[in-house]
Image (spheres, rainbow, N blue to C red):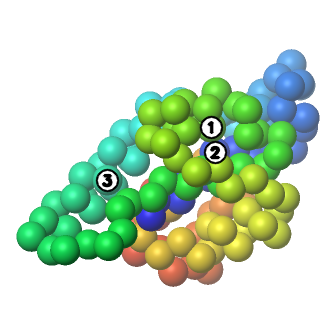
Amino acid sequence: AVHIRVCEVNAPFGDRKKGGLHGHSYWPPLPVKYYTDLVEHELGSYASSSQGHASSTSPVVMVVAHPECMESPEATALVDRFGATMHVGHAADAFYAIRSATHAVVLSCGTFGWLAAWLGKATTVHM
């Protein structure tokens, strides 16, 4: 599975005038291409490692988002493009989802996701 943290919320999502999605002008939202390129890379790695092996599971793309970010352009694009599952929850839920990832994690800016990934079990973490 590829777990993706799409945003850190320090200000309401709709209030981009107060410093962007993250509430800080120095933490702008990452481009959708950042996420899509890394997900495609991870899905390609999954496909090549599974060739010739019977697999009962297919790769899963999970977008981990705070409720205020679930309708962000980044989350919407990933759901539309990869059929990603949305895991919407507050801090503890999102922290657990990232920490429990076993394959790959793709992070947004912010220390919250970084700490969860560092404490987690994922074999690959993209920052």
Secondary structure at numbered mark 2: loop
- On screen, residue 83 versus residue 93, left or right, reads left
Along the polypeptide, which appears first: circle 1 or circle 2?
2
Please say if 111 is above or below 78.
below
Contact, CB < 8 Å: mark 3 with mark 2? no
Q: Quadrant of residue 92?
A: bottom right
Q: Amino acid at mark 2?
A: Val
State the image coordinates of residue 42 (x, y, percent, origin top left): 33, 55
State the image coordinates of residue 83 (x, y, percent, origin top left): 49, 42
Observer-nearest residue: 11 or 78?
A: 78
Mark 1: few/some/many CA within 10 Å (<14, 14-19, 20+): many
Determine the CA span between mark 3 and mark 1: 18 Å
Contact, CB < 8 Å: mark 1 with mark 2? yes
Contact, CB < 8 Å: mark 3 with mark 1? no
- On screen, residue 53 versus residue 71, left or right, reads left
Q: Residue furthest top?
A: 17
Label 3, on which residue?
43
Q: Amino acid at mark 3?
A: Leu
Label 2, on which residue?
6
Along the polypeptide, which appears first: circle 3 or circle 2?
2
Q: Amino acid at mark 1?
A: Ala
Determine the CA span between mark 3 and mark 2: 18 Å
Mark 3: few/some/many CA within 10 Å (<14, 14-19, 20+): many
Task: Name the residue rendered at 86%, 25% in the picture.
Answer: 14
Whether residue 58 can be seen here: yes
User: Which part of the image, by quadrant, shows the N terminus?
Assistant: bottom left
Please say if 111 is above or below 100.
above
Task: Name the residue rendered at 22%, 58% in the picture.
Answer: 47
Disc assigned to residue 124: none
Label 1, on which residue?
75
Whether residue 24 can be seen here: no
